[in-house]
Image (tube, rainbow, N blue to C red):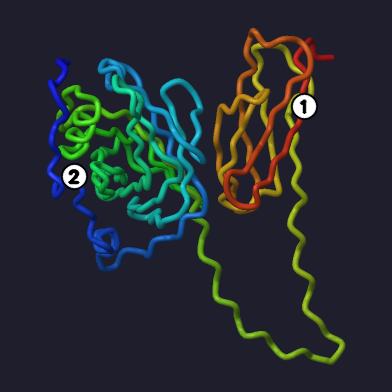
Amino acid sequence: MAKRPGAVALAAGALFALCAPGAAAAQAGSEGDPPPREVSGGYADWTVTGAELAGRGVSLDVTGPAVRTSAGRASFPALGGEANPETGDAELELGGAARFEGPVARPLVLGGLRLRLADAGGALYARTVVDGRAGELALADLTRGAAPAVRATGVTWAGLRASLTAEGAALLSSWSGTEFTAGDGLGVLDVTVGTPAPKPEAAETPRAASPSASAPEPAAAPEPAASVAHPTLAPGAEQSVTGEGFAPGAVVLVAIDGDTRYQTVADADGRVERTFPVYATAFEGEHTVDLSAVTGRGTVLSVPFEVGVPD
């Protein structure tokens, strides 16, 4: 696209239109709908590939606690919010910031990321500073590719296609000096959050039958532990790792030999499981898979395995 001769002037009212408080509740609160559940952990994977940004010399990076998981993909932890497994509506706060690198020396950093999912789509909001003024804008509209996948303790929205709003296009154009327009693609988001069922209200404790009677001791939480399905396996084979002792709903990163490749969410029992391929080019000898919690107790587990000829 052709370069603009100068920075585009942005109308402050259009750029920094703040979302009205409680709007999400109004959208999701139609009479008869089940109440939303509080989010406990999760993440949003944002993949930007092809010519959507690269053709304009722009790339996506992140600041912590968000992480880059692969080329063109960034992962942002869900810090809080609410989700309704029945309707598929949600409002989520994401950790970290999106850092756009491009044809100018100064990167564009967008923090305060927030997802609103409702009906057949939603929007991605962000906060930034322009001319010394901070505000929130609707960066991209989201279109669902499929109905959310609902589990007992979580919800996944896959294939949320992002496209720039007029505000987002004006911001990127002003920053980069390159023409962006409303509707331009901004990648795909895959979102997974934990939605544990609310705990039932405690019933009134009955009187003890005798002075010696006592309540049973609560079950102790399992000690953190991890194991692999195959202590030794050949290059190109498939390995599985299992971990327990995490906080229910915790976001868990899976790293192979220190390379973070995957994320998962602990179930209601604090257990995670992930299957992954062992590269055909993997060297013979000891390798390591690490499980580290981004949220919850911050548990970190490490388990070795061998690549070679199985016995």
> Amino acid under label 1?
Pro
Secondary structure beneath label 1 = strand
Find residue 185 and report its horizontal and vertical position in percent: 24, 27
Q: Residues within 10 Å of mark 1 (few under 14, many from 20)?
A: some
Contact between marks 1 and 2 (CB within 8 A): the answer is: no
- Total number of numbered labels? 2
Report which residue position mark 1 lands on.
304
Q: CA distance from mark 1 to mark 2?
A: 51 Å
> Amino acid under label 2?
Leu
Find residue 308 and report its horizontal and vertical position in percent: 77, 11
User: What residue lies at 42% left-to-right and 43% top-to-bottom?
Assistant: 149
Say which quadrant the N terminus sits in: top left
* Horizontal relation, residue 55 to residue 310: left or right: left
Q: Residue furthest front?
A: 132
Report which residue position mark 2 lands on.
15
| Discs 1/2, front | 2
Front-lying residue, 7 or 266? 7
Find residue 222 and report its horizontal and vertical position in percent: 75, 53
User: What residue lies at 84% left-to-right and 14% top-to-bottom?
Assistant: 311
The dot on residue 293 is none
Find residue 303 and report its horizontal and vertical position in percent: 76, 31
Looking at the image, residue 91 lies above or below residue 294? below
* Horizontal relation, residue 125 to residue 277: left or right: left
Front-lying residue, 278 or 254? 254
